[in-house]
């Protein structure tokens, strides 16, 4: 069961109302009904008319914006809330539990997720900072920060391009580059820069995180993971927890439980089979840890059932 402390960065809103309304209009035009659409590869717009129950998912590196509505993400014992006045940056793969908290039929949640490509980020970083960017260690794999008119405007122009237009095909990467530049010069820029730098500690940790994701059902050996990042076991543990908010074992457990929930909703396997499939040798341990994270026992986790909300 999640009992989080909420992280929500309050500051003066620098977004102009006109820019915000134009983004709302653009997303409404693209999505006149509830649902989602991939506007172009890696750029996904969504529209929702109602608040949702807690939903486990895994986010890859991405920039998330809301033109309307609000969402909350839970990671371990911490939560991150954002709305139309903020952007959210995921710089690593993160198992999270998400919840839409503000959305109605008349004022639906309108969101945009832009997947981030390390190669493109590296190219833009080199253009902006040819002598190198000041190295800062990212404090966490998730950052929430107030948005700006320039970011909102670039996002709007990105999604209003004609996908079948030859000229717009060439303009798309230019607007994407502009958006990355706006972010690089923002207070969360160094987090973005680390995604594209293969020599940073973040990329080394990403190698370890990717290995855990691919082998989450196997026993975890910290010494072997530390070797992959060229760190001592103790240093690896410290860096991993600083970036993800979890220990490597907790991260692995979260992946296992997220996959178990997916299987419970999408297959006819029984609870025991699912527990063994995701790496649990003990059925009671699986049930206990599943209940602790999601608020219900695996046997009660059926499609359409609403998990307990955080208290």
Image (cartoon, rainbow, N blue to C red):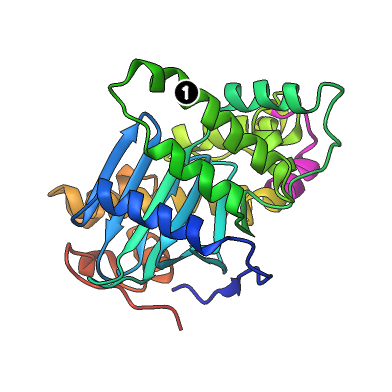
Q: Is residue 29 left or right of residue 203?
A: left
Q: Residues within 10 Å of mark 1 (few under 14, many from 20)?
A: some
**46 or 147: nearer the eye?**
147
Q: Is residue 97 visible?
A: no
**62 or 33: nearer the eye?**
33
Magenta segment range? Answer: 229-240
Q: Residue drawn 68% across and 48% down?
A: 243
* Residue 270, position as x, y percentages in the image: 17, 54
* Residue 249, position as x, y percentages in the image: 57, 50
Q: Residue drawn 75% across and 30% down?
A: 200
* Residue 232, position as x, y percentages in the image: 80, 36
User: Residue 85's image quarter?
Assistant: bottom right
Q: Residue drawn 17% across and 62% down?
A: 303
**245 or 252: nearer the eye?**
245
Task: Assess whether residue 125 is covered by the magenta stretch.
Answer: no
Chief secondary structure of the magenta portion: helix
Q: Which residue is mark 1?
A: 171
**145 or 173: nearer the eye?**
173
Q: Is residue 217 visible?
A: yes
Q: Is residue 159 above or below residue 98?
A: above
Q: Is residue 88 above or below residue 305?
A: above
Q: Is residue 172 above or below residue 134?
A: above
Q: Is residue 302 left or right of residue 234?
A: left
């Amino acid at each position: 069961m999640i009992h989080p402390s909420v992280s929500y960065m309050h500051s003066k809103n620098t977004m102009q109302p006109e820019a915000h309304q134009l983004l709302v209009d653009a997303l409404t035009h693209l999505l006149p009904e509830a649902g989602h659409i991939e506007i172009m590869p890696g750029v996904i717009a969504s529209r929702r008319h109602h608040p949702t129950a807690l939903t486990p998912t895994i986010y890859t590196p991405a920039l998330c914006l809301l033109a309307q509505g609000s969402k909350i993400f839970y990671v371990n014992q911490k939560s991150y809330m954002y709305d139309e006045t903020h952007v959210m940056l995921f710089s690593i793969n993160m198992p999270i539990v998400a919840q839409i908290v503000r959305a109605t039929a008349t004022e639906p949640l309108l969101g945009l997720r832009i997947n981030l490509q390390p190669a493109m980020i590296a190219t833009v970083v080199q253009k902006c900072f040819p002598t190198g960017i000041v190295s800062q260690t990212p404090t966490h794999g998730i950052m929430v920060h107030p948005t700006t008119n320039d970011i909102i405007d670039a996002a709007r122009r990105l999604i209003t391009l004609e996908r079948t237009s030859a000229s717009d095909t060439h303009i798309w990467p230019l607007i994407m580059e502009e958006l990355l530049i706006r972010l690089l010069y923002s207070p969360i820029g160094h987090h973005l820069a680390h995604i594209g730098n293969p020599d940073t500690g973040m990329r080394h940790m990403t190698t370890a995180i990717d290995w855990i994701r691919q082998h989450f059902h196997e026993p975890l050996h910290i010494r072997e993971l530390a070797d992959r990042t060229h760190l001592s076991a103790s240093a690896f543990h410290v860096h991993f927890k600083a970036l993800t908010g979890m220990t490597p074992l907790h991260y692995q457990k979260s992946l296992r439980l997220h996959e178990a929930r997916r299987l419970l909703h999408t297959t006819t396997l029984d609870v025991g089979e699912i527990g063994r499939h995701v790496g649990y040798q003990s059925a009671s341990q699986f049930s206990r840890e599943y209940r602790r994270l999601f608020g219900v026992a695996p046997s009660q986790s059926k499609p359409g059932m609403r998990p307990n909300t955080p208290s």
